[in-house]
Amino acid sequence: MKTAFETDLIVEDYLDGARIDRFLSRHFRNYSTHRLQRIVQAGFAKVNGIPAEPLQRVFRGQQISIRLPEPPDKTYDPEPLPLEVLYEDAWLIIVNKPPGMIAHPAGNILSGTVANALQYYLDQQTGVRSLLRPGIVHRLDQFTSGILIVAKEHLGHRSLSIQFQQNRISKAYLAIVRDQPEQNAFENSNAIGEHPTQAGVCMTTHPQALRAKQAFTRFEVVERLPGHSLIRAFPRTGRLHQIRVHLSDLGFPIIADDFYGNDARLLEDRELITRQALHAEQIEFSHPVTDLRMKITAGVPADFQLALQRIRSAWSGQ
């Protein structure tokens, strides 16, 4: 695999006036600013054919020539893990994340993540180890399966991040919950904040919640089941654990949910599925470069399907 890389870049409008190391850090996200400063200082960067100064600013339309003689210093360890790729082009990859896999290394989990798998996948495309850094744009809980959007380069990452911040991305989730709502369509608009007393990552709609923020989720009943329901959720905001918290708040907790489920029935839930029965089923967004509206759907994993089969079997008493 190659150890050095050379390319020419054109300064984008949104980076007009940026210092050259900041500009380069947007294009080469696996390189720290300090490492890029050293590369510029060593004379490996040119602006319109003239060697760049370390503190030089660049302006829209300028051509930046860069040679990267050193390996990157901000990397995920590449691992050849299986990935279900739902869509891919030059700017982004969309994967169907399996339950139990976290998005990127955190805490004591340094391997076996989506980021590790994608780093290996991208390295095979470039022939330069860690030249591209997978940019995971949004959150998906470790035990929630489904769609995860990953940007390959900075323009896609920036555009998608803005769409998420402005709530211009539509998402749909499937959840298996306890009991049955009276109505086929309902919603929850209670604000969500941090739990005032419980330690760890735990959110609540309680009036005493800390740093509560506006939240809204619309729900539809997909299928009524013995003692359960299959629900489709449409979150319009992106609060931490939003769907799980809003369903629990309404009295319909997702089965096998350690944080927000029914503790007295957790062992019974675990006979159906060993993790919260939540799946990111569909996402709709504008492509970051072409601006075409896109809709991607991910099939539910085997454990989710098996849980549904086990619940349905109760109709016949099996």
Image (cartoon, rainbow, N blue to C red):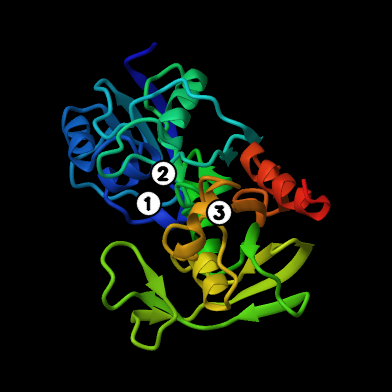
In this picture, residue 174 sits left or right of residue 167: right
Q: Which amino acid does label 1 sit on?
A: Phe
In the rendered image, which residue does mark 1 sit on? 59
SS assignment at label 1 = loop
- The image quadrant where one finds the N terminus is top left
Q: Which amino acid does label 2 sit on?
A: Gln
Image quadrant in which you'd find residue 112? top left
Mark 1, Cα crowd under 10 Å, few <14 / some 14-19 / many 20+, is: some
In this picture, residue 190 sits left or right of residue 29: right
In this picture, residue 186 sits left or right of residue 62: right
SS assignment at label 2 = loop
The first of marks 3 and 2 along the sequence is 2
In the rendered image, which residue does mark 3 sit on? 269
In the rendered image, which residue does mark 2 sit on? 62
Q: Where is residue 175 in the image (x, y as percent from the top left)?
A: 64, 58
Could you tell me which residue is drawn at 46 percent across and 50 percent down? 12
Q: Are marks 1 and 2 in contact (CB under 8 Å)?
A: yes
Could you tell me which residue is drawn at 60 percent across and 47 percent down? 272
SS assignment at label 3 = helix
Image quadrant in which you'd find residue 293? bottom right
